[in-house]
Amino acid sequence: MNNQEKNQLIIQEILKWKENHLLPEKQCDFLLALYTKGGEIEISGPNDTKKQNTSLSIWIKLHFIFILIILVSVISLDYYFHSLWYITSGILIVTLIINYLFYSKIRTDVSKRYRYLFIFIQFLYILQLTVFIAEAAGLGNYINFVIILNGTGWIIFGFLKKLPVFGYVGAILIIAVITYVVFFKYIG
């Protein structure tokens, strides 16, 4: 990395500090004047990225609303109306594909929080899909085992990606299934 690139990187950081009020504006202006040598270096305007981020955040919010509505409606559709397994599985598979295509287009422009939420919701879709497929295959007695395997997958994913939240959620899922089996099937 040459000096010009280093200066440009430092300038971008100072602009972020100024935008987020991490330093007083006078100090940011002084540092910008220092690193731009009085304005010799061209600064790419943050307004263009701000407009792009605003429109991107609207699409991200709409995307989350869409995937949550689909997830809740599929679960309630199966629970209340006992719909056919291939209809609900088809809806889940199409939604998984749409989610992946949408996420692959905006992957570089989103925050870590969005990535984690996206992965978490995708895991919920996969959990629901595995339950539907297990029921359809006549493995209704093994659904608890399938859910425990899914929770184990969450723990492994959290360990491999160094994301402890997924490990915790997987552990909670496994504990909840074991608690359900012990208290409601054998004791109750």
Image (tube, rainbow, N blue to C red):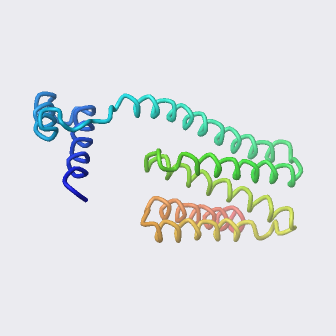
Q: Quadrant of the N terminus?
A: bottom left
Report x, y in % for residue 181.
67, 66
Q: Residue furthest right?
A: 84
Task: Work out whether residue 70 or residue 175 is closer to the camera in this orientation and state it.
Answer: 70
User: Depth check: 178 or 32 in front?
Assistant: 32
Total numbered labels placed on residues in the image: 0
- Coordinates of residue 17 in the picture (x, y in percent): 23, 37
What's the residue at 14%, 41% (across, down)? 35
Q: Quadrant of the C terminus?
A: bottom right
Relative vertical location of residue 2 with respect to residue 40 in this rendering, above or below: below
* Quarter of image, res 30: top left
Q: Residue at x 82, y 52 (%)?
A: 90
- Left/right placement of residue 12 relative to residue 150 reads left
Dividing the picture into quadrants, the one containing residue 130 is bottom right
As drawn, the residue found furthest toward the front would be: 40
Residue 104 is left or right of residue 2, and the answer is: right
- Which residue is painted at 12% across and 38% down in the image? 37
Q: Residue at x 25, y 45 (%)?
A: 8
Rendering coords of residue 164 (x, y %):
43, 63
Residue 179 quadrant: bottom right
The picture places residue 60, in percent across and down from the top left corner, at 55, 38
Left or right? Give the position of 18 relative to 64: left
Q: Nearer the viewer, residue 65 or 180?
A: 65
